[in-house]
Image: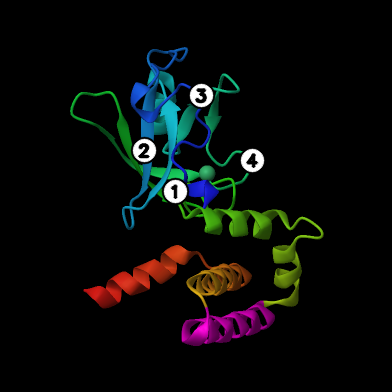
């Protein structure tokens, strides 16, 4: 899957190991802030903050960052309404990174996914569910509602079972891809996030 390629977005000659030093913010060095949901430890997003952004987060109790592209401070949720209530700010051992534990008011990722680190396929489906672009296959399915999405899941499950019984590995991969994809669409149709499914599986494994 192209979206899981770790090198995506890096230009030629760069590698993940060559980390470039960050330009400073207006109020001192920029530090990466790992934003974690205080309820279950899920990493929601990563952003950057200088001393002023951290001061604003501390004083307001809501997450503030420095935008490197727009060169300005921004309060998470200003446009989406999905603010992050800050529970705790922690520095790492050498003080060059911050852990921010939060209670999110909604999805942290611009795609509509709870986490920026959710599986690629889910971020795609969540983005379609949020934007509803006309003519998109996901938009069309979502318009028909959860029951119709559920029927697609049943259909694809039968096709996967038939492939398992007597077709090639490639055919099985294709049918399981359809099954996973439609399962995600079904979750989106009910306004659920796959994190809830994972939490249920973890609960059972205990
Ligand atoms: Zn994101």
Mark 4 to mark 3: distance in Å? 34 Å
Q: Nearer the viewer, mark 1 or mark 3?
A: 3
Q: Residue at x 60, y 54 (%)?
A: 124
Mark 4 vs mark 1, CA separation in Å: 21 Å
Q: Which numbered dot is residue 79? A: 4
Cβ of mark 2 under 8 A from ligand 1: no
The one nearer the camera, 115 or 107, is 115
Task: Give the mark toward the camera: 2 or 1.
Answer: 1
Mark 2–mark 1 CB contact (< 8 Å): no
Q: Is residue 150 magenta?
A: yes
CA–CA distance between discs 4 and 2? 21 Å
For residue 34, the mark is 2
* Label 2, label 3: how far apart the Cα atoms are: 27 Å
Closer to the chain start, of discs 4 and 1, is: 4
- In this view of the protein, can residue 56 be seen by the observer? no
Q: Which residue is mark 3?
A: 12
The image quadrant where one finds the C terminus is bottom left
Residue 51 x/y as whole percent: 38, 19
**Mark 1 to mark 3: distance in Å?**
24 Å
């Amino acid at each position: 899957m192209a979206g899981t390629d770790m090198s995506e977005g890096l230009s030629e000659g760069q590698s993940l190991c060559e980390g470039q030093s960050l330009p400073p913010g207006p109020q001192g060095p920029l530090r990466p802030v790992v934003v974690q949901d205080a309820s279950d430890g899920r990493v929601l997003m990563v952003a950057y903050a200088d001393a002023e952004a951290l001061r604003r987060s501390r004083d307001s109790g809501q997450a503030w960052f420095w935008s490197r592209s727009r060169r300005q401070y921004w309060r998470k949720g200003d446009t989406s309404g999905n603010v992050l209530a800050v529970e705790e700010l922690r520095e790492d051992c050498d003080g060059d990174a911050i852990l921010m534990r939060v209670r999110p008011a909604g999805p942290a990722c611009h795609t509509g996914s709870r986490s920026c680190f959710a599986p690629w396929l889910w971020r795609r489906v969540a983005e379609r569910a949020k934007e509803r672009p006309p003519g998109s296959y996901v938009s069309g399915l979502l318009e028909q509602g959860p029951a119709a999405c559920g029927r697609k899941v049943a259909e694809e499950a039968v096709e996967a079972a038939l492939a398992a019984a007597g077709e090639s590995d490639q055919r099985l991969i294709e049918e399981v891809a359809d099954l996973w994809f439609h399962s995600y669409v079904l979750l989106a149709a009910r306004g659920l996030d796959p994190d809830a499914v994972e939490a249920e599986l973890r609960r059972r494994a205990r």
